[in-house]
Structures are given as structure tokens and as C-alpha cells.
Image (tube, grey):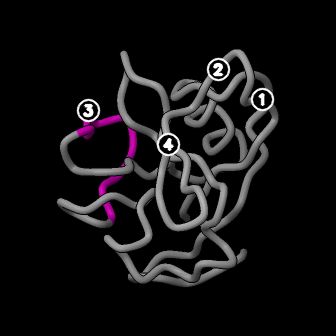
Amino acid sequence: MVATWRGYKWHKVLVEGPMTNSNIIKACKSRGYRCVVDHRAYDDGQCIVVNGNAHMSYNPHQDFPRDVIDRTYWYTGQGRQPLQNWRGTHRWANPMGDMWETALCVE
């Protein structure tokens, strides 16, 4: 466990292979955790919404501990690439170049 925030225990997990939304789900589920959707607009029922109408991947939208969240990837629904929290901003993942990275899951 790396943090407790908004009533959840948060865990950093390694996402094997290309950084895709389906691989984020797989990485969380394989450890008995749930994935977290980046923003309510991306909610398709596969992951849980924790931060409502604000991006988890974008620091100004939440007060999650920065040392934990930096460079993590977030689920954005099927048909999109995950978003990465990147040093105070966020960016879309490149599944051809972003591989074997980390995501945050909850229990």
C-alpha cells in the first residue's frame, strides 16, 4: 500500500506489456484490486470513479500525494489510450512506447 485517500487503500501495480486500458484492468484484478477511472466522463463500468468530474491524472484537479501519483497511468475507457500523470500535467499513453509502467489501484 502506498497511500490512503478518500477512504481507499491505494496500491501501485506494474502493468505488464503495452500501456493499454485493458492491461490496467488486468493488472489490478490479478492482485485482487479495482482499477480507478481517470474522470467520470470515461466511466464505462469497468473501473470505479473516485474523483468525480476531475482528472486523477492532472494534479490541479486533486490533492493526491504527488510523490505517489507522478508518472502513473489511469484508465480512460475502451477506445482510448490511458492518461499518464506527468510532472504536474497529464499526457496520453503511447502503447508502442509506454510499456511495463505503473498504475494505481484500490482495495
**Which residue lies at the image location 61% right of the left edge and 24% below the top edge?**
94
Q: Which mark is residue 95?
A: 2
Badges 4 and 3: C-beta atoms under 8 Å apart? Answer: no
Q: CA distance from mark 1 to mark 3?
A: 24 Å
Q: Which mark is residue 37?
A: none
Q: Is residue 37 magenta?
A: no
What whole-number distance in Å separates the C-alpha atoms at marks 1 and 2? 7 Å
Q: Note whether 15 is above or below 69 in the view shown.
A: above
Secondary structure, mark 1, is strand
Q: Which x, y percent locates residue 22?
A: 54, 24
Report the residue marked by disc 3.
Answer: 44
Q: Amino acid at mark 1?
A: Met
Side of 4 where 103 appears, left or right: right
Main SS of residues in magenta: loop
Return the residue nearer the eye: 92 or 27. Answer: 92
Task: Identify the image quadrant of residue 1.
Answer: bottom right
Q: How many badges with numbers are in the image?
A: 4
Q: Which residue is mark 1?
A: 99
- Badge 4 crowding class, 10 Å Cα cut-off, few under 14, some 14 to 19, many 20 or more, is some
Q: Image height check: is 62 above or below 89? A: below
* Disc nearest the viewer among 4 and 3: 4
Three-letter amino acid code at disc 2?
A: Pro
Q: Which residue is mark 4?
A: 91
**Which residue occupies 64% across, 65% down?**
70
* Cβ–Cβ under 8 Å for marks 2 and 4: no
Placement of 59 over or under 96, stated as above or below = below
Give the magenta range: 42-50
